Image (cartoon, helix red, strand yellow):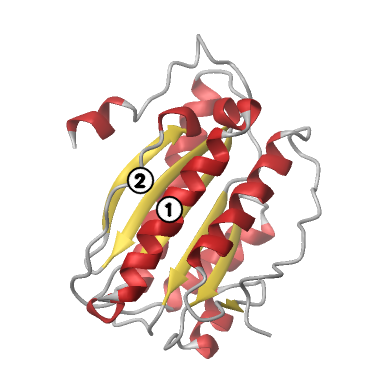
Amino acid sequence: MSEQVSFETNDFASNPEPRCPCVLLLDVSGSMSGEPINQLNAGLSTFRDELAADALAMKRVEVAIATFGPTKVEAPFTTASAFEPPTLAPQGDTPMGGAVMQAIDLVRERKNEYRANGISYYRPWIFLITDGAPTDAWDGAAAAVREGEAAKAFAFFAIGVRGANMDVLRQISVREPLALDALKFRQLFSWLSSSLRSVSRSTPGTDVPLTSPRGWAAV
């Protein structure tokens, strides 16, 4: 844990590149036991490796990981060059509402740090992956997502693993949630890293069209 904390605030003076922040909001509740959590961990390794292949993304993309079951910040924001994904283990229930609010808080705090240090940034992404339904109140989180999207404070994406309540995800996410085909976490994270690399090569404030989620999303 001490190693992760040491990366929480990057050296903005030595790396003044604009930042492309992404929060991975991951369901690690008990229902993810077995192959789902194993494939999720393998997907995170793919994500790290593919970001590492892009020198500019290594300087610009920042990743934070928050999990729920219970709600916890597994890894604070760090540039891709220092990102080492934790090995996640299943536990607890699915407090999705609280987790979404924590992810929004993480984004807000990080943007304040960018501003305080004169660092420009791209619109942050919050990337939710879940295989269940919330076990806590989530109406407030849904309202906060709608408000944040309307203000262009962040972009929120929801991915449902088999067993996910897609109807609830549609009420939380402004964008249409996508269903993961089987357990294709590696393909999902490969698409995510490619998308972030494309955004990091653009000018902050411009909209970058994302490629179709072909290969991992269920039709």
For label 1, count other residues whose C-alpha is less than 10 Å away and answer few (under 14), some (14-19) or many (20+).
many
Which quadrant of the view contains residue 138? bottom left
Q: Is residue 157 left or right of residue 113?
A: right
Given residues 44 and 127, the one toward you in this image is 44
Q: Is residue 56 left or right of residue 44?
A: right
- Tell me the quadrant of the picture where the N terminus can be found: top left
Is residue 183 depicted above or below 113 in this figure? below
Which quadrant of the view contains residue 84? top left
Q: Is residue 154 visible?
A: no
Residue at screen point 26% across, 74% down: 29
- Residue type at the position of mark 2: Pro
According to the picture, the residue beneath numbered tag 2 turns out to be 85
| For the residues bearing labels 1 and 2, Cβ distance under 8 angstroms | yes
Position in image of residue 145 (x %, y %): 55, 65
Classify mark 2: helix, strand or loop: loop
Given residues 217 and 62, the one toward you in this image is 217
According to the picture, the residue beneath numbered tag 1 turns out to be 44
